[in-house]
Image: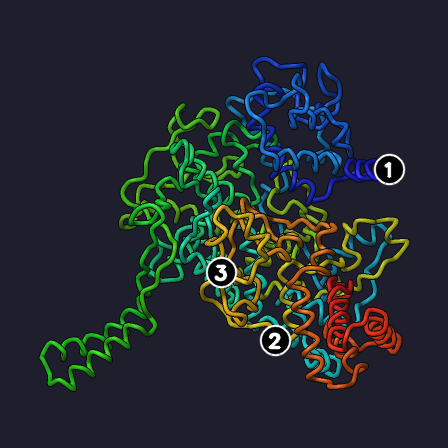
Amino acid sequence: MLVAALVLAVAQEKPSPEALEFFEKKIRPVLVERCYSCHSAEAKKLKGALRVDSRADILQGGDTGPSAVPGDPEKSLLIKALRYTDPDLQMPPKEKLPAAVVDDFARWIVMGLPWPGGGDAAKPAKREGMEIRAEDRAYWAYRPVNRPVVPAGAHPVDALLLAKLRDKGLSLSRPASREVLIRRAAYDLTGLPPSAEEVDAFLKDPAPDAYEKLLERLLASPRYGEKWGRHWLDLVRFAETNGYERDGDKPNAWRYRDYVIRAFNEDKPYDLFLKEQLAGDEMEPRTSDAIIATGYYRLGLVDDEPADRDQAKFDGLDGYVSTTSQVMLGLTIGCARCHDHKKDPIPQTDYYRFLAFFHGVNPTARDGPGAETVLARDEAGHKAFEEKLRPLEEELKRKPDEPRRKALQKAIEDLKKSPPKDEKALSVAETGRPPDTFLLRRGNPRVEGEKVEPGFPVVLGFPDPDLSKTKKGQSSGRRTVLAEWIANPANPLTSRVMANRLWQHHFGRAIVPTSSDFGRLGEAPTHPELLDWLASELVARRWKLKDMHRLLMTSNAYRAASADDRSALAKDPANELFWRYPMRRLTAEELRDSILAVNGTLNLKAGGPSVFPPLPKEVLATSSTPKSAWGKSTPEEAARRSVYIKVKRSLLVPLLAAHDFADTDSSCAVRFATTVPTQALTLLNSEFMNEQAALFARKLEREAPGDVDAQIRLALRSVTQRPASAKEVARGRALIDALRGQDGLDAGRALTGFCLMALNLNEFVYLD
C-alpha cells in the first residue's frame, strides 16, 4: 500500500505525459464507447447514480460506493465489475471486455487514475450549435506565431531559457565533458554509438569549431535518416501488416519507410514532406517519391472481414482525420467524431468538414482490395529511359541478322532491369467525384445529418476553401488544398508542432509535453516564447530540419551536463525549466543496434525489403499461423539496423517489445519509458543476448589474443566510449576468474559471461 500511496501522490500532483498518453489511448476511448451511454452527463438515464466521465466522479462512485481505489485495482469495484467476478456486478452488462482491456484499466488504477486537467467532475453542457467565442480564438495555440526579440549576440535558445531559469533562481548545469558530448550527439542524430577512433579524433581536435564539425559529419551520415525517420514512423503508425486476427501483409509498405528515411537524409523541406504525403498523387511533376509518399494513407489497421463495412469505411477515414490532425496540427479533431469536442472549440461539423478532404481517397488503390499501384517513372527518368530504349526497339523491328538480334534483345532486357524502372508500392488515388459528406449522428454511418463541405477548423479563423477549380485529372484536388493550408506559414499550428517535436527528441521532454495535443486536454507550454521563436525560425530557414538540429545542438542548454544539483532539484525536480540535460535510456532500436555495433556484426546496408531476425519458438507460437507468420533472413541480413526489421503488428522482436517499441495501432507521439523486470530478464537471459555476448567475446579474442586485461579494456571502451580505469579492469578480471574457478567455465565461456555483463551496464544502456 505504501507503493500505491506514492504512485497516487505523484499521479495526483501532476501525471506524466506518458501516463496521460496511456489514458487517452487505452482508457478514454473505452469509456466513451462502452460506458458513457449509461454513466455520463450525456446519459438519458443515469444508471446506478454512477458517472465515469471524470476522475472525481469515478472516485466518488455511485450507489455501490467508490468505483476505484487509486493504486490498488484488487480493491476497486470497477475492476471487479469488468472481470465479471460477481454475478450481480458485471459491466458492460451485455458483453465482457477483452482481457487486455481490463488489464489496461488495472494498470491505469495502479498509476493513480491519471486524467488530463486533474479530472475534476464534468459539468453538463449544451453541445448543440457550439459557439466559437473570442476567448476560444485567444487560446495560445490558435493565435498567430509571435517571434520574440532575442538579445543581440546571445544564442537564442539559451537567452530564452535563461530568462525563466533566473526567475526561479536557477542556472544551467556545468558543460558536459567532450566524451559525454560526442556520445550524446551521435545517439541523438544517428542512433548509434561513436567508434573509439571517432571519439579519439574529437578529443584530440583543438579547433574551436571541433564540435560544429562533428555535427556536420553526423548530419551528413546516412544513419541520420534512419534515426530521425523512425521518429516520424512512430507518429504515422507505420506497420507492414493490417492487424486483427489474420494480420495480413501490406505488400511493399517498406517503400514508404525508405521514402521517409530518404527525405530526412536529403533534408527535404518539411512543408514539401507533408504535401507529398497528403497529396503526392496530385502534384506536378509526377515523381515516384510523391506517389510512394501517399502510402501514408495505407499504414493503419485494416479489418479484412468487417462485420459492418460502412462502419469500417468510416473507421478508416477516422484514421486519416485523427492522425493528420494530431501529427501535423497538434489537434485532437478525432474526439469530435460522435459529438462536439468536450474541451476544445471543435464542433462535430469541423470533424466531418475535415473528413471531407479525404472522402475521395480510394485506399485499395486501382485494382481492387489490397492491390498495389504501379508507379510511373519520374519525368526525367522516363525521358532518359525512352531515349535509350526507342532506337534499340526500332532497330529490332528492322529484323537484323541473328547475332545482332540477340545482342539487341539482351540490351533491351538489361535496360529494362536497370533504374529508373517501374516499382510497386502502396499508394492511393481518387477516381471520379468524391462522395458527398454528411455529419453522422453519434458517429453512426446510418444516421446522416446535415451535408457538409470540406473546411478548416473554424476556431483558427481561415476562410472556407474555394474548391471550384481544384480538380486535377481524375482527382478532386481537395487534398492539395488541405496540404497547402497545413503547410502555409500563416497556419499557427504546423510550425509550432514540428518545432516542439524537434525539441522533444533533443531534450527528452517537449516544451508542450503533450506533443500531439495542443488543446486544453493537453499541457500548456513551459516556454511559450521559446516555442514561438523556434516555430518562426523553422519557417525562416525554409522548413529545413538539419538547420534546426544545428541550432538546438549548439546551445549551452543542449551541451549542459546531466549531473544532479540539490538546490536545483528542490526548485525544479522534474527539470521543466531544462536546467540540466535529461539522462535517458536508449530507445529499443538504439539498444539493439548498439549491441550489434559493439560486437562488430552490425550490417549498415540501407533500404530495401524488410528483414526477419530469428524469433524464439515461444513467440512464434503466439501467432494464429506460427509456421507462416515470420520470414527467414540470412544472419548478415538479420543483423541490419532495427528500422529495417519487418513491423508485424501481431509479432514483435522480444528485445524491442520489452524496451517500449512504439504502439503501431495509433499515432505514437511519446514512447512509454517503463522499467520492468522483463527488461532485465531479456538482457540477461534471452537467447539473442547470449548469442551477441558470444560474438562480442570472439571479437575481443581476435583483437587481443591471449591478453585478458586488454580484452576487458577493449570491451569496456566499446560499451562506454571511454577508457576503463584500473579498478574497472581489476573487477572485470575478478569476474572472469570467478566464472572459471568457481563455476568451472572455460576461458571462452568466461569471457562471454563478462561480455554479457558489459552489455548490461547502465553506462551502456543509458545516455547522459
Report the amino acid beneath label 2.
Arg
Task: Pick whichever of labels 3 and 1 is earlier in the sequence.
Answer: 1
Residue 689 is situated, as x and y percent measured from the top left of the image, at: 67, 64
Identify the residue shown where x is 82% and y is 76%: 724
Q: Are marks 2 and 1 in contact (CB under 8 Å)?
A: no
Q: Find residue 141 and report its image quarter.
A: top right
Left/right placement of residue 498 relative to residue 50 reads: left
Cα gap from disc 2 to disc 1, whole angstroms: 50 Å
Is label 2 in a helix, a strand or a loop? helix
Q: Mark 3 sits on what residue?
A: 260
Circle 3 crowding by C-alpha within 10 Å: few under 14, some 14–19, many from 20? many
Q: Quadrant of the C terminus?
A: bottom right
Report the amino acid beneath label 1.
Leu
Is label 1 in a helix, a strand or a loop? helix
Is label 3 in a helix, a strand or a loop? helix
Q: Find residue 635 and report its image quarter.
A: bottom right
- Judging depth in this view, the residue of 411 and 349 nearest the camera is 411
Q: Mark 2 sits on what residue?
A: 217
Q: Mark 1 sits on what residue?
A: 2
Identify the residue shown where x is 56% and y is 32%: 345
Residue furthest left as drawn: 398
Q: Are marks 3 and 2 in contact (CB under 8 Å)?
A: no
